[in-house]
Image: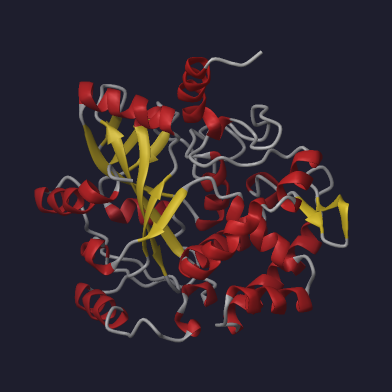
Amino acid sequence: MAIPVFTIMKYAEQRIPTLNEYCVVCDEQHVFQNGSMLKPAVCTRELCVFSFYTLGVMSGAAEEVATGAEVVDLLVAMCRAALESPRKSIIFEPYPSVVDPTDPKTLAFNPKKKNYERLQKALDSVMSIREMTQGSYLEIKKQMDKLDPLAHPLLQWIISSNRSHIVKLPLSRQLKFMHTSHQFLLLSSPPAKEARFRTAKKLYGSTFAFHGSHIENWHSILRNGLVNASYTKLQLHGAAYGKGIYLSPISSISFGYSGMGKGQHRMPSKDELVQRYNRMNTIPQTRSIQSRFLQSRNLNCIALCEVITSKDLQKHGNIWVCPVSDHVCTRFFFVYEDGQVGDANINTQDPKIQKEIMRVIGTQVYTN
């Protein structure tokens, strides 16, 4: 019996907005995450992983590597930081599900049988090729396959498992007061959460604040979302002001949460920051791959978030705590090389800063 067109259209209308909540293969709800995310993805069931990686679904990965090299480098750097962390058993989540290229009926990397040492070896190969090879995607794949047969499949997983929308911002759309050329649009909220956020925004309004978290945590954040980690095993800095997502309108506070103070760090002067930013953005686009920040072993990063200004938002001076996860959405992501950071005195409540944020976000977020 034929299904009426109206019924099909009604199903599509209700189903499409929730595609990100279900596995693209088995259509079951995801079992590995706290909630839905922005991009559809495969679940961790072995049969689904096998189907996903062997039925041509990954054909888009080549384009992403070719056109979004700095985004790929960022994803690899986050993966490396999580894998090398003493807390990897807690924060390296999800663990890769990668089909063995020599035996497509088995998983070379299996969340049920974690092998961090073998994973590290494959990731080292990914990084060494990314650092040396400037050729086409096919050339990169060829070099990886020669060095380690699991390197390229792992790179594919790193790209495809990212469930957030990350785009390198062109110079004209960057927030210059952040004094780094490594600026990204970062959207991680699924349509349902974004809709709830916009409803709350109409009722209570919103503002912007920084969220600082060590780079080792972002591998998980991009795949599981920005969650309330207070009083859980994911908590790193404590919860002195109660349970919730910690934010601050002051950049220096969030830089502290991102790992500043550990290792060799120096706060540059404003003149140094301006000179460095201008220098980085006068280098031709054909600059050597050696200038990519993937080579740096010391990265700092903070996110600029939009937060609902309801009574739920608790303000303890310049430390804000939002206990409602739906009331915080990431908007921008900033990365700093070799332990350097930007201006420590940025205040998102400054009218000039707010005006600049709105200038950029007006066309970057709500038109995507």
Task: Tell which of 57 and 44 is nearer to you.
Answer: 57
| 266 lies left or right of 213 | left
Task: Please indicate, yes or no, whether residue 96 appears anywhere in the rendered image.
Answer: no
Task: Please indicate, yes or no, whether residue 199 appears anywhere in the rendered image.
Answer: yes
Instruction: Give the residue drawn at x 53%, y 67%.
Output: 73
Instruction: Give the residue drawn at x 71%, y 77%.
Output: 142
Task: Tell which of 2 and 240 is nearer to you.
Answer: 2
Q: Is residue 26 above or below residue 188?
A: above
Q: How many callouts does the rendering have?
A: 0
Colour style of the rendered protein structure? secondary structure
Q: Position of residue 294 (x, y in %)?
A: 52, 72
Q: Residue pushed farthest front?
A: 1
| 291 lies left or right of 268 | right
Q: Position of residue 39 (x, y in %)?
A: 52, 42
Instruction: Give the residue drawn at x 60%, y 82%.
Output: 133
The quadrant of the image that shows the N terminus is top right
- Residue 319, picture quadrant: top left
Q: Is residue 307 above or below residue 272?
A: above
Q: Is residue 153 above or below residue 314?
A: below
| 119 lies left or right of 350 | right
Instruction: Give the residue drawn at x 62%, y 58%.
Output: 59
Q: Position of residue 118 (x, y in %)?
A: 80, 63
| 313 lies left or right of 234 | left
Task: Tell which of 45 and 291 is nearer to you.
Answer: 45
